[in-house]
Amino acid sequence: MESLLLFIYLIASITFILGLKMLSNPKTARKGNTVAALGMGIAIIGTIVLYTNVAGDHLGNHVWIIGGLAIGGVIGTLSAKNVKMTAMPQMVSLFNGMGGACAALISIIEFKHLVHDFKPELYAGGGYTYFSTLDGGVLLVILAGLIIGSVSFTGSMIAWAKLDGRLNDYAFNGQHIVNILMLIFTIGLSCMILFLRPEETITFFYAILALSALYGILFVLPIGGADMPVVISLLNSFTGIAAACGGFLYDNTAMLTGGILVGAAGTLLTVLMCNAMNRSLLNVLIGSFGASAQSGQSAGAQGTYKEMSISDAAVLMSYSSKVVIVPGYGLAVAQAQHACHELEKLLADKGVEVTYAIHPVAGRMPGHMNVLLAEADVPYEKLKEMEEINDEFPSVDAVLVLGANDVVNPAAKTDPSSPIYGMPILDVELAKHVIVNKRSMKPGYAGIENELFFRPKTSMLFGDSKKVLQDLIAEIKNL
Amino acid sequence: MEQILQWFAEHQDMIYIVILMVFVGIEVIGRVPSVLHTPLMSGANAIHGVVIIGAIIVMGNADPDDITALILGFLAVILGTLNVVGGFVVTDRMLEMFNKKK
């Protein structure tokens, strides 16, 4: 029956490739996800029923396996079903961390087996170390899985805590040097362990585990919250590689293909995300957002802004011929996407042409805002991407910025000292009027002032997005 | 050193798989629109949940008397399942939003 299992793994590998391919096209994406899930399903069932180890024994402990699957399945489904659309990025991070932890645990258990099963009598010549035995390669794979898996786990947890607002950016001087030294030290220890007698390796193994876990934390801590999506994507590809290490351990092709596929695709996706923000990966990892923001903060913090009343805004928009809405994370937090759609329909009924300008990183992640607006039934054609809408701004009468900040900050174009300098932005300032809805004058996610708010064309409309939109809708209806 | 090289030789076909998969992975998502970055990442996240197979094997091979191995393996199975199931369900929910509008 072993050959049937190999065939199942082949099918699973094909579904993974096909699934990823389909996921990268809007038309087939959902089907692609289902295809990959089905492949995963048969691979899991096939493993439980058909797997035999070297000795030819089938797997035991079925109660434990099924129990674990059931518990994980129920918790996973419930939390994935109940998570708010706005909290999606941290959820992905959390699940990614689980995968990393799983890979690390596998390494720990297999290491124990390795040490336990070591037969010194086979190497009667004495002076045996892992390096001089056939287990050397196995140990290397175990260590790789351990290090990558635990970095991915702790890193993802930190990313989750940051996105969830439970943790602030934290950086100290010379942190990068400490990080790099730690990484070198960890890898050094891993090489050293190969030259030790098996019974001596145990302490070192756990030291490596602790160091990798700590490294994951220190690696993600200084990176600014706005860059978290890139970090999650990177950690995602790490977990893929950790999973592939398992593939080597068990000569398991499904794990190998799935893991490496995600490792490669995830790395490319990370780079693509960086490109969407016009930043290099190195820049994200080294030049932490939070640390450099302090220099940008001093400039342009002063100035006067003017406030606008709801009724003025209502009048302005109702008598415009072209209105563009720029949705940001503030809108998502206020769960105002439905109210926003209502306003858009109301204005459209009055003959106003309304479109949405979607910045590539609007929300918390590329594509996040599209998901949120789609949830509120906003038609796809109304969502304009940045390149497309930027040419249209000069002919726009009014722009309504809803809880967006950094993506409309002109400092990205004009101020080389600004941490977001170089990021492409929506040129809302070219429009005739800009109405900015924010809860307060507090700086945005990147922690920097936005001089757009102090421009003469800009009027501020303070308040919770949902409340403001509802008031606007009521006001327009009364006109 | 010799032994490690020998290990590589034994796993030659797997190493070829790794190399080819790197290219397939890059090729497959090469031209993804930025709208799909988040769901794609989430979908890829679910796929690396394939590590669950390793967890199942570890669990199934664990000596029933070895409590530590049982508990660690059990934990690995739960975490792996969370990754797989949660990952696919979250991705599906995201994509559901996209499909509705067509």
Image (spheres, coloured by chain):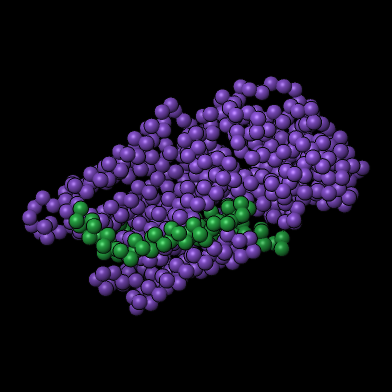
Chain colours: A purple, B green
Q: In the drawing, does residue A472 fall left or right of residue A207?
A: right
In the image, residue A457 above or below residue A102: above
Q: Is residue A247 left or right of residue A441?
A: left
Q: Position of residue A89 (x, y in %)?
A: 56, 48
* Identity of the residue drawn at 88% across and 39% down: A315
Q: Position of residue A159 (x, y in %)?
A: 50, 42
Q: In this view, does A32 lie above or below A5?
A: above
Q: Which residue is drawn at 38% across and 66% down?
A: A253
Residue A115 appears in the figure: no
- Screen quadrant of the C terminus of chain A: top right
Seen from this angle, which residue lies furthest front?
A391
Quadrant location, the N terminus of chain A = bottom left
Can residue A187 be seen here? The reply is: yes
Front residue (pair A403, A165): A403
In the image, A436: left or right of A422? right
Quarter assignment of residue A393: top right
In this rendered view, identify the residue nearer to me: A317 or B8: B8
- Which corner quadrant of the image does residue A403 belong to? top right
Instruction: Give the number of callouts.
Output: 0
Q: Position of residue A273 (x, y in %)?
A: 56, 47
Residue at position x 72%, y 48% from top? A388
Rendered view: A360 above or below B58: above
Write down the quadrant of residue A226 in the picture. Answer: top right
| Residue at the image point whose x is 57% and y is 57% from the top | B31
Furthest-left residue in this view: A125
Please name whichever residue, A265 or B65, is drawn nearer the observer in this view of the structure. A265
What percent of the width, then of the height, locates residue A5? Answer: 38, 74
- As drawn, is A111 to the left or to the right of A157? left
